[in-house]
Image (cartoon, rainbow, N blue to C red):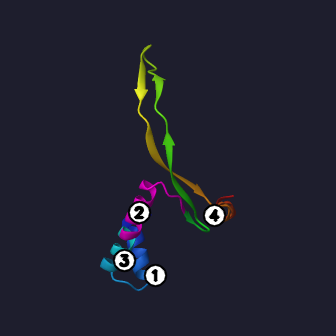
Amino acid sequence: MNKTDLIRFLAKRCDLSLNKSRQVVENMLDLMVLALKRGEVITIKGFGKFWANYSKSCLKHVPNSLNKVLVPAKFTPKFRCSESLKRQFLQIFG
């Protein structure tokens, strides 16, 4: 499922126009990105948790040579699914 599929599914499920459904999905995603940028954790009960993980800068070896490269510090988005979602998944794909 991609963003367009999600918009269509929401429009059909909630009896919304495609434009209104697109606005809802885009606003929700924008809000989630803003929250992650502020360092907030997003928890959706029964689905999972999103957060921004900080990695310090470090020196890494380049495999093909003896050189070392400085990898800058960065934030990366992370997701952990909830236990109930894991159970549902295991029931289907066990």
Distance from Cα at disc 2 to Cα at disc 1: 16 Å
Give how far across and how far down residue 6 sits, in percent.
42, 70
Indicate which label's residue lies in the foreground, 1 or 3: 3
- Residue to which mark 4 is pinned: 85
Residue at the image point whose x is 36% and y is 68% from the top? 26
| 10 Å crowding of disc 4: few (<14), some (14-19), many (20+) | some
Question: Tag on residue 21?
Answer: 3
The amino acid type, in three-letter code, at marker 2 is Asn
Secondary structure under tag 4 reads: helix
| Residue linked to disc 2 | 2
Q: Quadrant of the N terminus?
A: bottom left
* Residue at image location 44% in from the left, 13% down from the top: 66
- Examine the rendered structure and indicate whether residue 69 appears above or below residue 24: above
Q: Position of residue 9 (x, y in %)?
A: 43, 75
The residue sitting at the front extreme is 38
Viewer-side label of 2, 4: 4
Q: Which residue in the structure is indicated by mark 1?
A: 13
Instruction: Kindly identify the amino acid type of the residue bearing the numbered disc 4.
Output: Leu
Label 3: how many Cα within 10 Å (few below 14, some 14–19, many 20+): many
60 in relation to 20, above or below = above
Q: Secondary structure at mark 2?
A: loop
Q: Nearer the viewer, residue 43 or 13?
A: 43
Which region of the structure is painted magenta?
Answer: 27-42
